[in-house]
Amino acid sequence: MYYKVSGVTGKLTGATAASAYSPQGLKPTVPSQAPPMIFAVPTKVVSETGSVAHYMGINKVPELQKIFQVFFKGLLHPKMKMTTMGLTIGGTLYCLMALYIAAQPRKPQ
Amino acid sequence: MAHQAHAYHMVDPSPWPLTGAIAALLMTSGLAIWFHFHSTTLMTLGLILLLLTMYQWWRDIIREGTFQGHHTPPVQKGLRYGMILFITSEVFFFLGFFWAFYHSSLAPTPELGGCWPPTGITPLDPFEVPLLNTAVLLASGVTVTWAHHSIMEGERKQAIQSLALTILLGLYFTALQAMEYYEAPFTIADGVYGSTFFVATGFHGLHVIIGSTFLAVCLLRQIQYHFTSEHHFGFEAAAWYWHFVDVVWLFLYVSIYWWGS
């Protein structure tokens, strides 16, 4: 004997073996292989693109990148990161110390 | 991107979430230390750390999205969802203050004189500077839409001009509001009228400043060729935020300035 919970009464009721083994029913046509997975639109070769992205003016980004990396990367950004990490660690310690001191009972005035 | 079999962005390890969290710790504890011990050092430290975190985190995102190519269509979809959800949370934030306003103004207590505006309060004339402010923000909504269409059509000069005009209008609004605040015949301490007025319009003003800053960053990026006619989500996010700020003002104007006067 197989059982199921009746969708109508909410009580336990009898069921057939077929419905017990596959409660949601068998899908009539199930492909044996997974459907081909579709990722995002694959990168197209520029000559194939139908709607071309319009860049406004000539693209100066590569040469600006070179200037940027030579000048800034050497100087500004690594220093900024070190400063940030320093402030993070130092700030945390300062904060914990300040909170510890603040938690001490004060003398009544 | 060359060695992954999916279109999603597995972000490189980054210290900025940690530094941001520590900044929040320092700012909140710093606030408490300021209140009780009159020292602003900790809070200032937190603010500096917050600014550094914001600059570096968003700089990294811009790098990832532009020349590193990580912002594929599915990734961009996620970013869109994120921005929509964030703006929705801000809507709820303002809803709270509107609730407070309507709670007090629909049933004014005897202490207020049983009327709204309360006895002794001279409200601002809604048809003077507040109306100008409304026109300014509505115009800025037009100019930001103009900027969007310019970007989509590849019109570089127009995009820069309309975006700059939008920012100028935003700054004009801020200047006018600041002047109104200075000249107002009532203060935040003037009962529930003052509280609801200045907290609601004050937070709105803060959002105008944030929105103007976001648009200014977009202007810098537009000048530096970051946006293409197909891919400019940073700008779209800024435009959405700006429209949200505009809509909040319209509700503020109608509820607090006009109906509430």
Image (cartoon, coloured by chain):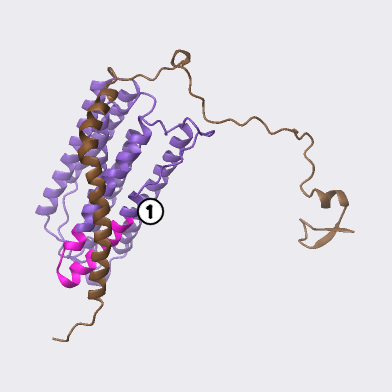
Please, which residue is most extreme toward the bottom here? A108
Residue nearest the observer in this picture, B145 or A97: A97
Residue nearest the observer in this picture, A28 or B43: B43
Does A32 sit left or right of B110 as displayed? right
Q: Quadrant of residue A51?
A: top left
Residue B43 highlighted magenta (yes or no): yes
Residue nearest the observer in this picture, B85 or B123: B85
| Chain under numbered label 1 | B
In the rendered view, tell whether residue A5 sits above or below residue B212. below
Image spot of residue B44 (x, y percent) = 18, 58
Image spot of residue B124 (x, y percent) = 16, 52
Q: Which residue is mark 1?
A: B92
Q: Colour of chain B?
A: purple
Q: Amino acid at mark 1?
A: Phe
Q: Secondary structure at mark 1?
A: helix
Q: Quadrant of residue B84?
A: top left
In the rendered view, tell whether residue B241 sits above or below residue B42. above
Does A37 sit left or right of B91 as displayed? right
Image spot of residue B105 (x, y percent) = 29, 61
Q: Which residues are magenta?
A: B21-44
| Residue drawn at the location 50% of the way across and 32% of the way down | B3
Image spot of residue A26 (x, y percent) = 79, 42
Please, which residue is most extreme toward the top here? A47
In the rendered view, tell whether residue B128 sits above or below residue B107. above
Q: Is residue B207 visible?
A: no
The quarter in which the C terminus of chain B is drawn is: bottom left
The tally of labels here is 1
Chain appearing in brown on the rendered image: A
The local crowd at label 1, few if under 14, some if 14 to 19, many if 20 or more residues have their Cα within 10 Å, is few
Q: Is residue A93 visible?
A: yes
Q: Quadrant of residue A15?
A: bottom right
Residue A38 highlighted magenta (yes or no): no
